[in-house]
Every structure is written in C-alpha cells, then in structure tokens.
Image (cartoon, helix red, strand yellow):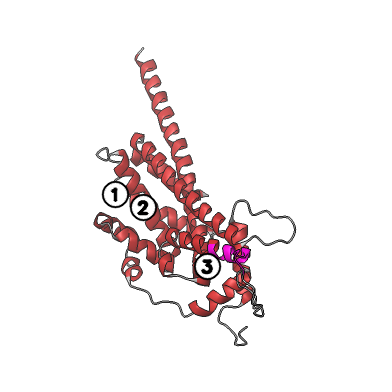
Amino acid sequence: MSSRRSRVSEEEINELISKLQSLLPEARRRGGGRASAAKLLKETCNYIRSLNREVDDLSGRLSALMATMDHNSAEAEIIRSLLRQ
Amino acid sequence: MQVPNSFKLALLKQMLLGFQLSAVSSNSMSFHERKNAIKLSADAAMVFARGSTRWTRGLVASLSKNRNNEDLLRGILGKKYERLSLPCCNSWKIPRSRKILKRCLGLCSRRKKATGTQHDVKSSSTLARRLVKKRIQVLKKLLPGGESMEGFSLLDQTLDYAVSLKAQVDVMRRLLKISKASNLNLHLKEEEEEEEEHAQRH
C-alpha cells in the first residue's frame, strides 16, 4: 500500500461511485451493501444506452410533428410558453 | 443529480437556433433528414450548454467527422467550435487513480503468502475483475472521447455525460409536449375561423 498521498483521494472516488448509484434508475438499495463494480458498470451502460435511444425516438417524433406544423406562428408560441417557465 | 435551469434554457435556445438554421420547418426535407437535423441540433446544443470538458470535445470530434455537419455545428457553437476542436492533453491523474479506484471497487486481490498449492479453479475475484474490465471497455465506447480515459476520469466524465443526457431528454420531451399542444391549438383556431366564415356567409 502506497504511503504517498495521491491526487485523487479514496473519499472522492467513493463519493463519485455513490453519485453514480443514485443517478441510476434502480438505485434504491436498502441497508448498506454497496453494489458490485460489475453491476454498477452494467447499469450505467444500460442507462446511457436508454437515454441515447430516447433522444433518437424524440427526434423522430419531433420530425413527424414539425412536418405538419405551420412553423412560423407555432414557433413563436412555443418559445413564448417555454420561456415563461 | 441535476443540471441548473440555466443549462436547460441554453440547451433549448441553441437547439431551436439549430432548427432554424437547418430549416426543419421547410417542406423540402425528408423525414430522416429532418430527424437527423433535429438530433444534431440537440447534441450541439447540449455541448454548448455544458462547455468544455472531455466528453464534449469527444462529441464534437465525432460529429465533425461528417463534413455535412460542419455548418450547423459552427452555427450553433459559434466561437466555441474552434476551442472545442483543439486536441486536449492527457490527465496526470491516471496512473495512481486507477489503482485506488480498483481498491475502492473491491477488485484488488489481497497479498497472500505463497503456499505452494495449485489453484486450478479461478477465484471469484479474478472473474469479477475480468467482468469489470469487459464492462469498462463497453463504457469507453459509449462515452464520447472515452477511449482515452481511465480510472477516475472515466467515471467522472461518465456521470457528467449521463446527467447532461438526461437534461437533453427532458428538454426534448417538454418541447414535444408543448409543440403538440400548440399544434392542436392552431388547428382548433383554424377550424373555428372556418366555421365562423361559413356561418357568416349563410
């Protein structure tokens, strides 16, 4: 075990790992038990893949919708209502 | 973990700018052309909102590979485009952090005294380590610019990327919802006007 102080502390890494865990959809874990590294990585990859798929799907739906819209008047209205929030 | 509202707002604005620049509302585009323009706008907008970090540079690099994308990328990113296209140096953190990371993930085998007995069954920790290595390779491919990252940087950038992606999805969902409502509203107004006209004539 290295006695030198390292640039990235264990604390930082543990914090990062727990942040990742809380981000993932099935992150609720009762009791202590940290997930295995393999499981964490698998769920992280699945999560990123599903987000990418969703972006792709939403792009398609927006494309279909924009084809039917009268864009000029609609866009102004959209922007107004979105920026209001 | 969430992004600030300013992030989502910047993402939305640049995405709408992208739609304008690529004229998604014109009738001359095919469904797929429009869809690709929308997706590209969304990605460039996400990069703009996040600013400079390793995965955004990686994303710009991969999006730039297609020459057709350059105009839209420049249009959305403006001055940032040049800055994000510069090659970035490797992090110093890599060698040490990888070892600590592995220890925290419970992957390092404890040192044992040599016993002289042969183990012909692989220990579960060896298998775990192999599995983790495999999955890290998968993650590297999923993360833009991930191939050149290791250890702490890889996980840190992964978290950053995932959070930004989620924000991108949220913004697009909201835009879709409001666009639908707005579209419906417009159609209803048109119908109303037509009925009025019809009623006036009779």
Circle count = 3
**Above or below, comparing residue B111 to residue B45 in the picture:** below
Residue in view at x 45 percent, y 45 percent: B175
Which one is nearer the viewer's eye here, B8 or A57?
A57
> Which residue is label 3 attached to?
B156
- Give the secondary structure at mark 1: loop
Marks 1 and 2, Cα distance to the nearest angstrom?
9 Å
Specify the label residue B41 is tagged with: 2
Residue B104 visible, this orientation: yes
Query: Which of the 4 image quadrants contains residue B55?
Result: bottom left
Q: What residue appears at the point 28 percent right and 39 percent down from the top-left corner?
A: B30
Bounds of the magenta segment = B119-130
Q: Is residue B150 magenta?
A: no
Asked which quadrant contains residue B64, the reply is bottom left
Graded by Cα atoms within 10 Å as few (under 14), some (14 to 19) or many (20 or more), the crowding at tag 3 reads some
Q: Callout 3: helix, strand or loop?
A: helix
The reply to the same-chain question for discs 3 and 2 is yes
Count neighbours of disc 2 (C-alpha within 10 A) and say few if under 14, some if 14 to 19, many if 20 or more.
Answer: many
Q: Is residue A83 visible?
A: no
Letter of the chain that mark 2 sits on in the rendering? B
In the rendered structure, which amino acid carries the disc numbered 3?
A: Asp
Mark 1 vs mark 2: tell me if same chain. Answer: yes
Q: Report if the CB atoms under discs 1 and 2 are less than 8 Å apart.
A: yes
Q: Which mark is residue B22?
A: 1
Q: CA distance from mark 3 to mark 2?
A: 25 Å
B199 horizontally vs B153: left or right = left
Residue A33's place in the image compared with A84, above or below, is below
State which mark lies toward you, 3 or 2. 3
Q: Quadrant of residue B67?
A: bottom left
